[in-house]
Image (cartoon, grey):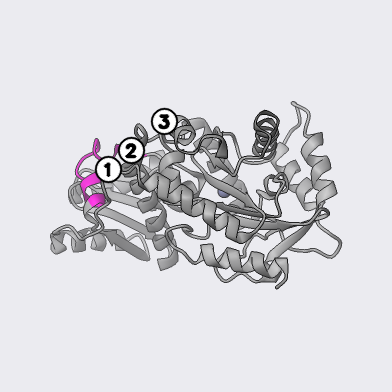
Amino acid sequence: MTELKKLAQMSDYYGSDPTLVLAGGGNTSYKTADVLYVKASGFPLSGIRENGFAALDRHGLQDLLLRGYPEDVENIDTQFIEDVMATRLPGEEKRPSVEALLHHGFDFPYVLHLHPTVINSLTSAVNGKEEAERLFGQDQVWVKLVHPGYGLARYCWDLQQEHKAKYGKYPRFLFLQNHGIFIPGNSPEEIGVALDEVISKIKACYTKEWDADLAPINTETVGAVKDILEQTYASVLYCGQKSMVAMCESREAAAGVLRPYNPDQITYCRSWPLFCESVESIEADLKNYSETIGGLPKVIIVRGVGLFTAGADLGEADRAMQLFLDAGKIAFYAEAFGGYHQLDDDFIDFIDNREVENYRRGVANKNL
Ligand SMILES: [Zn+2]
């Protein structure tokens, strides 16, 4: 089997596991000394084939990695994407993942990058860095939150070189704060062993379990909320899972989900959910949301009733539901690591602006 086929199989295997990949988040790569094959934008991991990867010149990528940008360069993010695109091999027309340069920087042939809820319960926790060190020691490197793009790729590369200089070997995985994990390896099997180890060690720290059973609900009230929302949205979904409903009991109980943890949540849920004090207040609350924040929320919490997601079609409402449940579980399980750590306003603004820019240019979610 060719290496590229192995890469496609590894990508499809993890991409098809809903506990590991939500709404297509994550990417993979394989490299030789000269060429990086990295997942292309618009090709979900699940079902990907050998033709779903963009081929880039690694010598060009290495130049870019070391060259960097002057401090005062304008539009560094746009420039960076253009510079990565310029390393495509002749004839390559697919758009490489925005994380391509980061993939290039690993000194291993295969790289798996995912944003699983379990791993993000550690990366999005107040004591995430200390707990990652305690659990995984020199096997890991903690990558503090920096804006995605050139800065993140260079920072990850620098940290790996420092680790090698200090301990004589590269780390087995990188934990990216409020983002996910990168696992490099000599084979997909080696990566699988590392991923299983990380997930089982994190889960072993949990002291409680998310209750996905349905809470006893008043179906009439849920129906009334749906009727109101369906006047505005084409698709509305409800989540009645006990642990989620418990978070909808009050604004205080919902504090862990009123602010996002990662860019995927911003992309699919918008940064700010709408919290409604009662069924009667929903219409006024929606109006107020569009006047103060702009547009419509994708996530609507109704106190004492539960969580609703809404969109222009079922897919939009469903992706918002997946990513908002991700936020709920992160808030819930991060307690094992000192409590949750949400994104600050500066980072949220950065991602929001990127989303607006992507929308303007008609580019689908670049996290994909
Ligand atoms: Zn990512």
Amino acid carrying mark 3 in the image: Asn
Q: Residue at x 83, y 41 (%)?
A: 63
Residue 127 numbered tag: 3
Image coordinates of residue 286 in percent, x first then y, are: 32, 48
From the viewer's perspective, is residue 269 above or below residue 341?
A: below
Residue 44 seen in render: no
Image quadrant where one finds the N terminus: bottom right
Q: Residue at x 63, y 57 (%)?
A: 28
Q: Which residue is mark 2?
A: 336
Which residue lies most toward the front here?
Answer: 168
What span is colored magenta in the figure?
243-258
**In front: 36, or 324?**
36
* Front-lying residue, 227 or 84: 84
- The residues tagged by marks 2 and 3 sit, at their Cα atoms, a distance apart of 9 Å
Give the numbered dot on residue 207: 1
Q: Position of residue 129 (x, y in %)?
A: 48, 32
Residue 250 shown in magenta = yes
Chain-order first, disc 1 or disc 2: 1
Can residue 104 be seen by looking at this rendering?
Answer: yes
Q: Does 11 sit left or right of 206 as displayed?
A: right
In this image, 179 relative to 217: left or right? right
Tell me the element at label 2. helix
**At which x and y percent is residue 219?**
15, 63
Q: Residues within 10 Å of mark 3 (few under 14, many from 20)?
A: some
Circle on res. 342: none
Whether tag 1 and tag 2 are in contact, CB under 8 A, the answer is yes
Tell me the amino acid under the disc marked 2.
Ala
Vertical position of residue 130 compared to residue 113: above or below = above
Q: Position of residue 4 (x, y in %)?
A: 71, 66
Q: Residues within 10 Å of mark 2 (few under 14, many from 20)?
A: many
